Image (cartoon, helix red, strand yellow):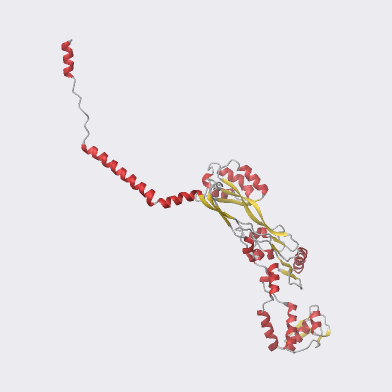
Amino acid sequence: MAVRSQQLKSTKKPTRPVAISRWRINTVLLASALAFVIVTLRLGNLQVVQSAKLSSMAHSEIKQQITLNPRRGTIRDRAGNVVALDVDRESLFAVPPEINKEKAPRLALMLAGLLGKPAPDLLAAMQDPDSMWMPLKRWLDPEIAQQVAKILEDEPGFSMVYEPRRVYPQQNFAAQTIGAVNLQGVGISGIEGFYNDDLIGSTGMITAEVDAQSQPIWIAPQQSKPASDGADLQLTLDPLIQHLAEVELKNAVDAHQADGGTVIVIEPKTGAIRAMASYPTFDPNRYYDYDPEMYNLNPAIAKGYEPGSTFKLVTVAAGLQAHAFTADTTVEDGGSIERYGWSLKNWNGGGHGAITPADMLYYSSNVAALQFNEMTGKKSSMPWCRRLATARPPASIWRARARGL
């Protein structure tokens, strides 16, 4: 047994330590050194070189400026009836990245009937890859908004937001005079356009830290500038006179098969405009359904038309100023008169005999006006016509117009 144990001990190989070559060690050390240098340079770039930029970017993620929109001023007629005001209505917006793509086609079909838009158009908006905030339908009626909210109750990627909408409760009442506001809230015609700067007010601003839903974190320090609502306006338009003017104007246009017409009623003592009506007219709640000329133009002040018998006042004023005739001068009004191969008649074809300038104005006699103008002559009457064409009305009349247009 002793001999066998000795043989076993003699056959066992001696152990040697594991040897690593020098180049491998150097390679590991070099790689570690390079990694350390890269990390150090990267940290230096982030912490020193780009410190201000990255800090600003991080700060902008949580601190934002939120615009506070003012409420547009209300417009009322002379009696205090509201003819234009802002009403908050819900608008539907989509956040395409958050919408379930598998459910999107079904939701588009369900919303198409309520929103009055084709399902393919809604689906394209809901899946727009380049948009983070896509309007689907603005200013929903309250009943429609409730149904839409019920359908989208548990669906991510949709948001109902209240927005002010300009509403004209009396529809086409004095439409060309009051004007309209476009979908961006800017007055584009009439009173709405002329006084847009006064009606629109000024926006406010909140500078605050916000949460993930972009809502202000109220416990954080804030800077705020409140919005200033637009000024309210009260017009000189009398609702009864305006209504009568519009009804009678429409009846007259229909009866005479005319292209259109205009009525202006002015209070003589003050120059205040009590009615300004034009026909055909439009509904400013849906101005975009009409031709631009219809809602961009107020025919009563923007279109030229023949002065007609009102010009007889100029005829008399020019003749009296030139001493071509006196207030007692008479001419014979036989109902018609011939000049240069043309026959001129009075509006009713009847004559009034010998009449003075005052009678001519009273009867609106075309025959007498021609004769008085011939007494004045071209040399004396034309300067008056030029002065009338370039004259400006008194300041009081301009102010009355501005209030009533």
> In what quadrant of the picture does the N terminus appear?
top left
Q: Nearer the viewer, residue 150 or 259?
A: 150
Where residue 176 sits, quadrant-wise, is bottom right
What is the x, y in percent for residue 195? Answer: 64, 65
202 vs 275, left or right, is left
What is the x, y in percent for residue 112? Answer: 61, 48
Res. 36 visible in picture: yes
Q: Nearer the viewer, residue 265 or 37?
A: 37
What is the x, y in percent for residue 241? Answer: 77, 66
Where residue 172 sits, quadrant-wise, is bottom right
Q: Nearer the viewer, residue 299 or 87?
A: 87
User: Is residue 309 placed above or below 165 in the rendered structure?
Assistant: below
User: Is residue 199 placed above or below 358 in the rendered structure?
Assistant: above
74 vs 2, left or right, is right
What is the x, y in percent for residue 34? Answer: 29, 44
Residue sitting farthest toward the top: 1
* Residue drawn at (83%, 83%) of the image: 352
